[in-house]
Image: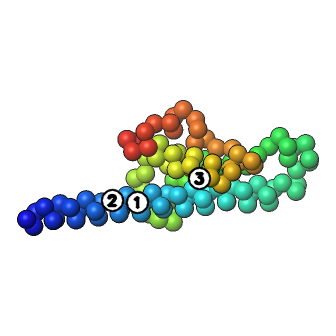
Amino acid sequence: MFERFRGRREREVAERRAALIDAQLGVAADIAIFAARREWNRRMPTLALKAQAEHCGRVDVEDVLTIAREYFGLTAVPHPKAAAVLRNRFELRAGSVDLLTDAYERQHLGHPYLG
């Protein structure tokens, strides 16, 4: 009886931990997107109008992984999972208006949980 309870409890803890990691990755992606936008807005007034129309800011999967490592201590996040989270947040935050990303490139389009 106690073994069944312990197994259920361990599963619940693992599910909560996975949800926390997903939430932290989402926050890391948001921070990376806003940092890229802030940098682009800082540089934009110094560019000519034609250059402003041709160039965009950029946020990469590596940016998300770096922020996840620095802010949350997440060191073992697979690239495809970080790319999936970045794609989700990029679309949610309308990133395509003024940013480019590598999250849609072929090397990142694996299954997010298989690394």
Q: Is residue 62 above or below residue 3?
A: above
Task: Give the residue drawn at x 10%, y 67%.
Answer: 2
Does residue 62 appear to the left or right of 94 in the view shown? Answer: left
The residue most toward the left is 1
Residue bearing the label numbered 3: 89
Please state the total of marks drawn on the protein image.
3
Under mark 2, the amino acid is Glu
Does residue 61 appear to the left or right of 52 in the view shown? Answer: left
Q: Quadrant of residue 33?
A: bottom right
In the picture, the disc for residue 43 is: none
Residue 62 in the image, given as x and y percentages of width and height: 55, 49
Task: Give the residue drawn at x 37%, y 58%.
Answer: 18
Task: Give the residue drawn at x 88%, y 50%.
Answer: 47
Residue bearing the label numbered 2: 15
Residue 25 in the image, given as x and y percentages of width and height: 49, 57
Q: Is residue 5 above or below residue 60?
A: below
Q: State which tag comes first along the sequence, 3 or 2.
A: 2
Q: 78 or 22: nearer the eye?
A: 22
